[in-house]
Each structure stands twice: as structure tokens, then as C-alpha cells.
Image: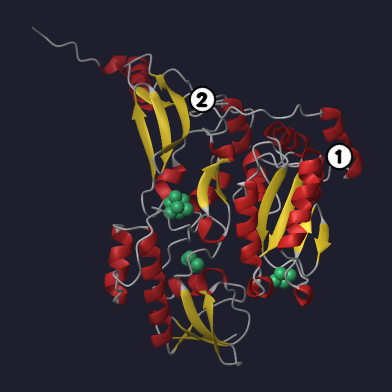
Amino acid sequence: MKIIMDGNEVAATSGQTILEVARANGVRIPTLCHNDALEPAAMCRLCTVEVDEGRGPRLVTACNYPLRRDAQVFTNSERVRAGRKLIIEMLYTRCRGSELLEELGREYGADFTRFAPNDKQCIMCGLCARVCERVGGKTLTLSGRGVEITVATAFDRASEFCIACGACARICPVQTIKMIDEDGERRILVQGREASRVKLIECVSCGKRFGPVLDLKEINERAGDSKVPPPNQGVCPECSRRNLAARMAERHFEQFETGEEG
Amino acid sequence: MAASEPATEIICQEPEVDFMLLDRIINEDFGGNRETMIMMMQAIQHEYRFLPEPALRYLSQSIGVPLTKIYEVATFYASFSLIPKGKHILQICTGTACHLRGSHRMVEHMIEKMSVSPGGTTEDMKLTLEVVNCVGACAVAPVVVEDEKYYPKADISTLDKFIERINAE
Ligand code: SF4
Ligand code: FES
Ligand code: FES
């Protein structure tokens, strides 16, 4: 398999996506809905490139297009750049003020006055829902379809399944999801609406609140080994490190006590 | 699981859900096979004329599909409804062919006559008005569908007869 990317022959194995090949060879393709830890969903279309597998150039999304035969790939052609410019302009109407989009806009010469704003503070990348399904409590989903897609919990109510891990808040490229620890509780807000509210544990040693009160059984099960004893839920990680260090020092280093004179 | 109080309690009168009936649908009719989830949901909707939340929770438990996923499917397909629908359902096609033959005038007529908006249900729960895309009978446009019965070349008088019939009930 011979892959020519932007005029240079690059190393690739059959089945690798265009994005993987590009990254391995130092070619940058912008993405918004891609995360290496998650299955590609090709929601944002920003990674669109031109590919010619002998039947003329076609536009495909690099993040989920596997290369299986000889191909020429153009990651930054005129047509590709024009497409990306349009995508950025349209996404910006939904997400005014997003720094990430503004930066991309500068790169591709986007005209942000071209379309009327329709602010939804969400680019429908679906990362939050996908990461929630993968590592979280399967709390968030994309409800509806087409441009009406919104990030929602089941029945649009605060969810009972959330484990308050905050992965959604972390992954959102436009900071639409917020995780707030306040008054002994952690809240996950999606566009200002409460998706979940979970109590935080107070450390018995220092009194600091440090993590959500969780059903560890299920989490340990998911982690794969139900025999692993649950960590001490009452003490925060800092205190347990400090306490352990103190105990070790007591046990093993007594003999080195110098017994100062005077 | 994490204890959390629902932020906004939605209070609505939902029909009592019959779990024996759900069991029959889920386990007998479809062998509890999660791949047939959409068909199970259709059967549930057929019984209640919408998808009651307790029924979906039960479905989730029974076939081991996260409630969130079921909710996603329910909101994706226009044919599923999470709110109760009226006894009768009138669908007016506003696909291209029907639109060109003036189906929007029929929609306006219904809005005016029954004071119901597209997608909405009359207060007495007798009628739900739905505006749908091409129902696949463009040759006889405009088409209306009353309770799954197709009326080709429909016009205002077709609707008036329908209104008369349901008012007489
Ligand atoms: S809320 Fe953020 S992560 Fe979720 S779909 Fe919207 S933009 Fe993507
Ligand atoms: S990164 Fe490929 S479609 Fe979003
Ligand atoms: S457009 Fe109405 S049936 Fe096709």
C-alpha cells in the first residue's frame, strides 16, 4: 500500500485511519470531535480531507476513514480549506465566543459575520456523551437529531446514574459543561442545567472535601477486579499519603534518631 | 449509586404501567433480546400511545440497556413520543409533493378548527395533530393519515368529516 500525503510518501499500515497516518507522520489535521481514547464518531467534519484512491478525489472525514489501498491524500488543499472555513463559520454561529473556534477561524480565514448567530453553546461533537458512556455512569446522551441535537440526561432530569467523575466537563471543547464543588456537593451543569448532584466526602483527617460519595462496589467491578479492597473512603489521598509516610518513618527510622544533645 | 435529588420534578398523570404486559412484550414476544429493543418500544408505544417513563425504566432493567440509551432512541425517532398522545392521531403530510398541492392549508385549517398546534394534543386528549414528511404516496398528494388509515387527494372536507366524527364520539 502506497500512501502519498500532500506529495510525500508516508508510512502506513492497512486499516489505519487517515488521521492516524497523518499524526504518525507529523501532518496536522484539525479535529474537534476526536479523542484517541474514544471510537471515532465523525460528528464535526472538521477533519475532512481529499482522498484519491484512483477514482478521482473525494472528500472524506480523516478521523474514521481507513486506508486500505494506494491513495493520494490532500490534507490542506484549496477545496479542503474552503470546506473547513465553512464548517468553522457554521459551528461558530452555535457557539459564539469560543476561543477554540476563533483560533481555528483565524487559521482558515473564517468570516464570523457571514451567518446569523443561533447560540446553543454546543457544537454537537458528542464527546461528552461518548466519554460518559465509556468511563462515566452512562448519564449523558445526545437527544433528538439533526441540528436539534442537545446534550441531555434521561428525561431531562438530574440523573441518578452519574458518578460525578467530571470527564464530560474536562472533554468539552467549548467548556459548556461545568463541574462545581460547593457546599459539600458536586454539581454537573450542562448549559446551566443541573445534570447531577452528588455529595462529597469529608476527609476525617483534615476536613477537606475530596471526592464524590460513590458506590465503590460497582466501580471496582468495572475496574475489573472485585477482590481489590476499596480504598479508605474516609481519608483524602493527601492525608493517607502523609499518614502512611508518618507510620513508615515511625516504624523504620527510629533507630536513626540522633538523640540530640543539650 | 450516587444519591441525588431530581432537580425538577415533572409531575404528570401517567397511566398505571402493567408490568405483566411489559413482561409479555419483552420476554415472550421478543425473547428478551436486546437487539429487538426498538420493536419492543414500538409495542409499548402501541399499548399506551406513548412511551411511559416507568415502562422504559422497566425495559432498561429487563434487557440491560442503560436508560440513557433508550431515551436517546426514543428522542431520535419522530414516531416515538414521550408525552401522551390523543385518542386519534391525524397526520398531515407536508412533504414536497403534498406541500405543492397545498397541504399547509389543511394544517392551518386544523389549527384553527381544533385549536391544536402541530405536534400538540387537544385538551380533551381526543386528537393529536402531526405534521409529517413524505408518507410515500406522492402520486395521490395531498395525503392525510387518520389513525393509520390513508386518505389520498385529501382536502378541507376530508378534515371536516374527520372532525365531525370525533366530535360525535
Ligand atoms: S456539550 Fe461540549 S462535549 Fe458535549 S456535545 Fe456539546 S460541545 Fe461537545
Ligand atoms: S474529527 Fe473527524 S469529524 Fe470531527
Ligand atoms: S410528499 Fe406527501 S406523500 Fe410524498
The Cα–Cα distance between marks 1 and 2, rounded to whole angstroms, is 32 Å
Please state the chain letter of the residue tagged with numbered disc 2 in the rendered image. B
Residue B2 position within the rendered picture, expressed as x and y whole percent measured from the top left: 53, 26
Q: Is label 1 or label 2 in front?
A: 1
Q: Is mark 1 within 8 Å of ligand 3?
A: no
On the question of residue B77 being in view, the answer is: no
- Same subunit, tags 1 and 2: yes
Image quadrant containing the C terminus of chain A? top left
Kind of residue at badge 1 = Ile
Image quadrant containing the N terminus of chain A? bottom right
- Residue A229 lies in quadrant: top right
Residue A68 position within the rendered picture, expressed as x and y whole percent measured from the top left: 63, 79
Residue B81 position within the rendered picture, expressed as x and y whole percent measured from the top left: 68, 46
* Lateral position of residue B15 relative to residue A29, left or right: right
Q: Are marks 1 and 2 in contact (CB under 8 Å)?
A: no
Closer to us: B164 or A152 = B164
Kind of residue at badge 2 = Ser
Residue at image point 76% right, 46% down: B88
On the question of residue B52 being in view, the answer is: yes
Q: Which residue is mark 2?
A: B4
Residue B103 position within the rendered picture, expressed as x and y whole percent measured from the top left: 66, 67
| Residue count near mark 2 (Cα–Cα under 10 Å), binned few <14, some 14–19, many ≥20 | some
Q: Which residue is mark 1?
A: B25
